[in-house]
Amino acid sequence: MPIEHFIVGTGITAKHRTSVAAPDRPDGDSPGPFGADERAALRSMFQHVNELNRRINAAHNWSLRVLAEAGIVLDSKISLSDSLSIAERERKARGEPIDSALGYAIRFLNLELLIEAQIERGEASAAAQFGIEFGFLFCEAGMKFQWEDHTLRGKRVKEGGQKGSEVAHGSPNDVSKRRAKIAARVQEEMGRGKPKMQAYEVAGREFGCGARTAMRAYRKFGKK
């Protein structure tokens, strides 16, 4: 049966893929008609077109709201393409970045126009390509508006933690030097015949850290 199911990618970015091909005729000269299984697989694949339409409609309504809130009115006396060109010039004049809400709104509406134009011309391949571009933009905008604040907040927390660690323990270079000294002290005690755990405890007391910290320092910096 000429239907293949496979997975592309790994982890959270893994995607299921389905490939459907027309079966060969018994004579092998040309592809035969789709059977029931092939038609069912195709119907399943084309459901994603409905999902694209849902996203286009959602983006269309959102984009019109964004333009209205920005005080930009699309002139019904001229083409939508020309109105969007005017809106784009206004965005640039205001200094709004391309990945602002206004920038995404204009790009969504422009891509919608391009998709519709290619469908009208019967250019399925070009329409599909713009559809893919629309999907990428839809996901990009979703990630930006839903996760950007959390991501940047997390970045600041991480940077603040790193600065706090440097205040408490010194720079990464200082920490490495200190751990190398701890490892050398452990080695010195072991050279005197002490068991490892006792050597870790002696070094830890001397450098104001626990035996486990001394053990990790030795494992990383000790001479084997």
Image (cartoon, rainbow, N blue to C red):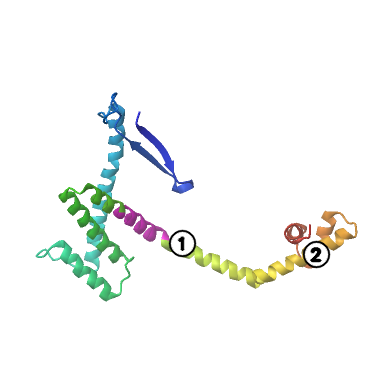
Q: Which residue is tagged 2? A: 184
Residue at 30 percent of width and 27 percent of height = 28
In the displayed structure image, the side of residue 11 where residue 191 appears, left or right: right
Q: Is residue 25 above or below residue 90?
A: above
**Marks 1, 2: nearer the viewer:** 2
Q: Nearer the viewer, residue 74 or 7?
A: 7
Asked whether residue 162 is drawn in magenta, I would say no
In which quadrant will I find the N terminus?
A: top left
Q: Quadrant of residue 113?
A: bottom left
Q: Which residues are magenta?
A: 133-147
Residue type, label 2: Ala
Q: Which residue is tagged 1? A: 151
Crowding near the residue tagged with mark 1, few <14, some 14–19, many ≥20 C-alpha atoms within 10 Å: few
Q: Could you tell me residue 93's position as x and y percent?
A: 26, 76
Asked whether residue 140 is drawn in magenta, I would say yes
Q: Nearer the viewer, residue 55 or 132?
A: 132
Q: Which secondary structure, mark 1?
A: helix
Residue type, label 1: Thr
Q: Which secondary structure, mark 2?
A: helix
Q: Quadrant of residue 164?
A: bottom right
Query: Going from the N terminus, do you reach mark 1 or mark 2 first?
Result: 1
